[in-house]
Amino acid sequence: MHRQPERAAADLPQSHHQRRAGDAPWGRAQRADLAPPGAPGASRVSDTGIGIPQSQLADIFNPFFTTKSPGQGTGLGLSVVHSVVRRYHGDIQVRSVPNVGTTFTIELPSSASSA
């Protein structure tokens, strides 16, 4: 079983194309905005942690899926993110390489294109 962070904190900037990186016990995290203001939005969040095993990728957005021991977490985080992104007609993709890291890309339509 791989080690999961006990908690994750994000300092995600609001301005486009701004990047922040920080060290964490499980790796290095970074966020980048990929679209200019007014365009459909895309953000990428990456870390240099242990990655997500291929066998678990199909389940990570399922409610209550967790790799933690009982009592250590409910597994709702990614399920909630997925629900919010889909509610706003967006898409979320994940790419993970074991022992290299994981990248989540979130794409949301502009307010004009989602109306």
Image: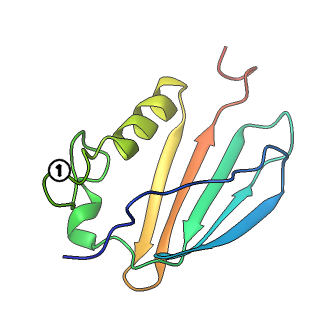
Compared to 72, does 110 lie above or below? Answer: above
Residue at image location 51% in from the left, 34% down from the top:
85
Coloring applied to the structure: rainbow
Q: Residue at x 38, y 46 (%)?
A: 78
The quarter of the displayed image where residue 39 is located: top right
Residue at 66% x, 51% y: name it: 43
Q: Is residue 62 left or right of residue 11?
A: left
Q: Position of residue 77 (x, y in %)?
A: 38, 43
Location of the C terminus by quadrant is top right
Rendering quarter of residue 40: top right
Foreground residue among 36 and 26: 26
- Pinpoint residue 6: horizontal percent, then vertical percent: 37, 61
Q: Nearer the viewer, residue 56 or 72?
A: 72
Position above or below: 41 against 47: above
In the foreground, 15 or 28: 28
Q: Residues within 10 Å of mark 1 (few under 14, many from 20)?
A: few
Q: Is residue 16 above or below residue 23?
A: above
Which residue is label 1 attached to?
Answer: 71
Quarter of the image containing the N terminus? bottom left
Compared across the picture, whether 27 is left or right of 59 comes to right
Q: Residue 67 placed where, x, y %?
A: 21, 61
Element at badge 1? Answer: loop
- Relative image position of residue 98 (x, y in whole percent): 36, 82
